[in-house]
Image (tube, rainbow, N blue to C red):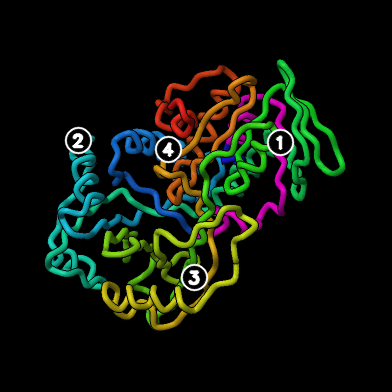
Amino acid sequence: MGSAAAYYLSRAGQRVLLLEQFDLTHERGSSQDHSRIIRYTYNNPAYITLVTAAYKLWFALEEASGEQLYYKTGGLNFGAPDHPSMRDTLHSVQRMKIPHEVLTPQETRARYPQFTIPEAMQVIFEPESGILTAARCVAAHLRLAQQHGAVIRPNSPVTAIQPQADSVTVHTADAVYSAARLILAGGAWTNDLLARLRLPALPLRPMRVQLAYFQPPDITPFSVGRFPTFIAWVPGIPAYGMPSIFDSGVKVAFHGGETRGHVSEIDYTPDEHTIAEIRAFCRGFLPGADTALKQTRICLYTMTPDEDFILDQHPEYPHILYTSPCSGHGFKFSTLIGSILCDLALTGSTPHDISLFRAARFTANA
């Protein structure tokens, strides 16, 4: 979200400084990976409206960067018909008139023989679902921001923030910067930044999610063009996956994991127990996909209690904005969030409805 905001602000002719506490390609957060799902199949119409706008911006970013960032694969949601997420997602796509098909497991297997889905389950197929090449998307935002004059400072953690009536001063270990506007997009470190502004901590819980990439003997059936993205609303923790791209291997993970009070408590060492659980899921639903583990890594979710984003401004200093979209489904919206932050920073308003994301919902008087 920070790289996207830097791009849109610099493109609008603003002088932009982006501070990153780690290297630009660090893997301690939520964005440095081969792929992320983009989809219309949400159980809340508000997100469908936003992702419709996000798709348009991703296409525009592709044109500006001269690089393909979105790959259309089609996407499956499957689970028991009475599962709340299945039921609400079907209702939402019907209400919003999103093209989709409701398939039986048998019809799904005829189209995608890689899957084995129990007869009692229902399948929602959405043709426009696909994958975003996550690391390349971030790099495109950064590269274009620099082309428009943005200055990027990696390995520059913020040590202090001093707000003034119409400006703000930001300190790092070796420099002091002043600006008229400040945007905080700290992901799992958001509360550390808010503390420097003496704002109360938000109910954000870093979640450790382990990703697995498998390399079957024949990867072709699991590659882009042959294999869809999927979300499996199965008993226990939901699972998701996406095709192999750039020789990544087929990606499978659970949409959930262990939460911690602070990101410093996250263990980035992959464990064999999680791999065994992912393999068990594959044996039931994707037989043959998990024959060889190619790589595994840790990704961070930054969870809110309701899994909705946070996008707001300082209550006393409206020229300071902060965001934590995350909750495990934020990447597809990142270019849109960056555009919204640009609008808010420059005009104080946005044409998009972001009322769902106000931080006040977590205060005593919300």
Question: Residue tagged by mark 1?
Answer: 196
Q: CA separation, marks 3 and 2?
A: 38 Å
Looking at the image, tell me whether mark 4 or mark 1 is earlier in sequence order: 4
* Residue found at x 36% / y 61%: 240
Residue 201 versus residue 9: which sits nearer the camera? Answer: 201
Q: Between tags 3 and 4, which lies in front?
A: 4
Disc assigned to residue 54: 4
Q: CA separation, marks 1 and 2?
A: 43 Å
Amino acid type, callout 2: Arg
Callout 3–callout 4 Cβ contact below 8 Å: no
Q: Position of residue 326 (x, y in %)?
A: 49, 46
Residue 78 versus residue 169: which sits nearer the camera? Answer: 169
Question: Residue tagged by mark 3?
Answer: 247
Q: Between tags 1 and 2, which lies in front?
A: 1
* Residue found at x 87% / y 42%: 174
Residue 149 in sight in this render: no
Q: State the SS at label 4.
A: helix
Q: Position of residue 347 (x, y in %)?
A: 56, 17
